[in-house]
Amino acid sequence: MTTPDPHAPPELPPEPIEIAAGTLQLRPWEHRLVPELLAAMRDPVWREWAVAKVPETEEAAGAWIDARLRAWREGRVLSFAVQDATTAELLGSVTLRSFGIWPRAADIGFWTAPAARQRGVAVAAVNVVTRWAFTSLELNRLTLYHALQNTAACQVATAAGYLLEGVARGALPRAGGGWFDMEMHARLAGDPAPRPAAPTP
């Protein structure tokens, strides 16, 4: 296997793809997911950590999905809908973004629907996309940010093998006003894989 040019941009799939992950299936966003997406975004916990305006209507949720599909095709944001592999229930989302800011690097983000919490879904989905980013996209570094007070997200980051590197003060706006201090975790392609752990949020 040849070593990729560290300064060359990664070759991103031009269209959204699907990744099988055992009991989970990571799929492109579809408009049939609008009702489940709206239900997830109405959750008070989800809204507490929101950094952008939350869709309130089916039309707005459909536009949210369209924006993510368009961003993938433009090579800006790769967003997966995390679903139950058997029932296709929407469990959450995992996203790669911020390509090109650092060579062979990106940011990874996630959220989970209320019914999917405390089941290990977030850790499993983040691990799947992390492996895919390091192997298929040949990235070297992934950074995971979460609001400093979001202890559940911190547990996911730690369980997925992302090491704490510091705090970025006032880094992202709160959807309701003000700014979040963001804790920064990162994982490198050469880091050891995390050990299997008990279910986390």
Image: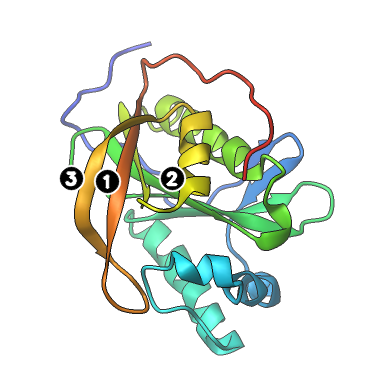
* Circles 3, 1 touching at the beta carbon (< 8 Å): yes
Is disc 2 placed on a helix, strand or loop?
Answer: loop
What residue is pinned by disc 3?
A: 101
In this rendering, the label closer to the viewer, 2 or 3: 3
Is disc 1 placed on a helix, strand or loop?
Answer: loop
What residue is pinned by disc 2?
A: 13
What residue is pinned by disc 1?
A: 99
Q: Amino acid at mark 1?
A: Phe
Q: Residues within 10 Å of mark 3 (few under 14, many from 20)?
A: few
Q: Is residue 123 above or below residue 27?
A: above
Q: The N terminus appears in which quarter of the rendering?
A: top left
Q: Residues within 10 Å of mark 1 (few under 14, many from 20)?
A: some
* Circles 2, 3 touching at the beta carbon (< 8 Å): no
The reply, left or right, for residue 193 in relation to residue 145 is right
Q: Residue at x 67, y 39 (%)?
A: 120
Q: Residue at x 64, y 76 (%)?
A: 34
Foreground residue, 83 or 32? 83
Q: Residue furthest top?
A: 1
- Could you give the CA–CA distance between mark 3 and mark 1, rounded to whole angstroms? 6 Å
Give the mark nearest the N terminus, 1 or 2: 2
Q: Residues within 10 Å of mark 2 (few under 14, many from 20)?
A: few
Display coloring:
rainbow
